[in-house]
Amino acid sequence: MPHTIEVFTDDSPLCRSVLDIVEVGKCASCVMIERNLGRETRAHAALLRKYRIQAVPTIVVDGRIKVEGKPDFAWICGDEFFAWLERRYPMR
């Protein structure tokens, strides 16, 4: 099943590396959207409130999963991976 992966970033090397991690590990059917707060803060204000984004990088998957900071795990797309993410990083 395809997922929508939103990555909240700025132009820092840390955020670039997180984008690379997600891009390499996502499957072809998943959609990755970069939300660059360094360039477009106002455009994403509603999402910042909705997801309670406090820092970049933050990854939000399907509006249900939120990973703050650089993941300390391999990003490997698949049903088991997303089920694990949902258990470990549920949106609160």
Image (cartoon, rainbow, N blue to C red):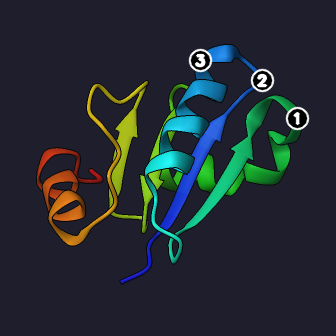
- On screen, residue 61 versus residue 92, left or right, reads right
The amino acid type of the residue labelled 2 equals: Asp
Cα–Cα span, label 3 and label 1: 16 Å
| Contact, mark 3 vs mark 1 (Cβ under 8 Å) | no
- On screen, residue 13 versus residue 83, left or right, reads right
Crowding near the residue tagged with mark 3, few <14, some 14–19, many ≥20 C-alpha atoms within 10 Å: some
- On screen, residue 13 versus residue 29, left or right, reads right
Q: Nearer the viewer, residue 55 or 69?
A: 69
Q: Secondary structure at mark 1?
A: helix
Question: Residue visible at 44% across and 79% down?
Answer: 2
Q: Which residue is mark 3?
A: 14
Q: Give the percent coordinates (x, y) of residue 21.
A: 49, 37
Above or below, 63 relative to 25 = below
The amino acid type of the residue labelled 3 equals: Leu
Above or below, 79 relative to 92 = below
| Contact, mark 1 vs mark 2 (Cβ under 8 Å) | yes
Q: Which residue is mark 1?
A: 39
The label shown at residue 11 is 2
Q: Give the percent coordinates (x, y) of residue 27.
A: 45, 66
Q: Secondary structure at mark 3?
A: helix
Question: Residue visible at 80% across and 39% down?
Answer: 41
Question: Residue visible at 46% across and 58% down?
Answer: 26
Cα–Cα span, label 3 and label 2: 8 Å
